[in-house]
Amino acid sequence: MEKSPFLILVTGMPATGKTTFAQLLSERLSVPMASKDVIKERLYDTLGFRDRAGKVALARAAAELLYYFGERHLCVGQTVILENVFENSTKPGLQRLIDTYKCETLTVHFHADPVTLFHRFLERDRSPGRHRGHVVNSRYPETGGETLSLESRGVTPEGMERAMREKGVTDFSVGGREIRVDTTDFAKADTEAVVAEVRQWLDSGPPLFP
């Protein structure tokens, strides 16, 4: 019996460990994966941007490339993992994939305590390993100037969480099965158990043609 393709979404607020988990899941299950942030980094390095509007345009392009990646796998019946901070504005693109390819969906949603997440976000942006295109807003490659931090802009943990909630990030859903993972303490987040649960879901998925 042929099975319908599966669309696995890994989402949640920034700095919750989404990308690391999506890569782990891809490796454990031998399933192709694409990350919007990683696509943006390639666009930053090849095209760059001169202002905030240019950076936003690259983010939109990255989203379209993410959907295209998903489409090319789903159209041949292949399971695929897409990782992003999915929100209300991303639902139409995802729903088009779901409706077109009749795929089963599983959303792995990462979340954490707002204060912990806020400080983790600050530390990540200060890290030398963080791609500078994510950190700066005015120009990349950089030509000098000051990078404004969340703190200098008056952003608080509560304000950050509220903004994510208003965009639909914290309760994002496109239906299907959902798994929520609390990464307030990474040491207590059993990602291997989540991988096992996803594997079981894939193995027991309903057939497309019974």
Image (spheres, rainbow, N blue to C red):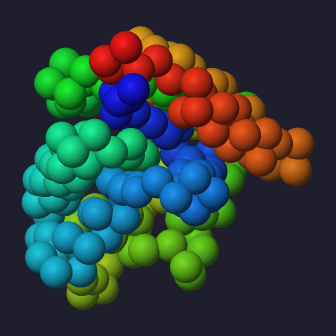
Image location of residue 95, percent across then percent down? 23, 21
Query: Quarter of the image holding residue 111?
Result: top right
- Going 19% across and 19% down the picture, which residue do you hit? 99
Give the total number of marks visible in the rendering: 0
**Can residue 186 be seen?**
yes
Q: Quadrant of the N terminus?
A: top left
> Is residue 142 shown left or right of residue 195?
left
Compared to residue 129, the image places residue 79 above or below, namely above
Kindly identify the residue that appears in the image at 20 percent across and 70 percent down. 43
> Is residue 165 visible in the rendered structure shown here?
no
Taking depth in this image into account, of 31 and 19 the one nearest to the observer is 31
Query: Residue 61, image x and y in percent?
Result: 13, 53
Report the residue that reaches farthest toward the bottom. 143
In the figure, 85 relative to 177: above or below? below
When asked about the image quadrant of residue 3, the answer is top left
- Position of the C terminus by quadrant: top left
Residue 64 located left or right of residue 117? left
Camera-side residue: 210 or 149?
210
Q: Nearer the viewer, residue 113 or 192?
A: 192
Question: Viewed as shown, does residue 72 lie left or right of 113?
Answer: left
Q: Residue 119: x, y in percent?
A: 68, 50
Q: Residue at x 54, y 33 (%)?
A: 202
Q: Position of residue 108 (x, y in %)?
A: 56, 32
Q: Residue at x 63, y 57 (%)?
A: 28
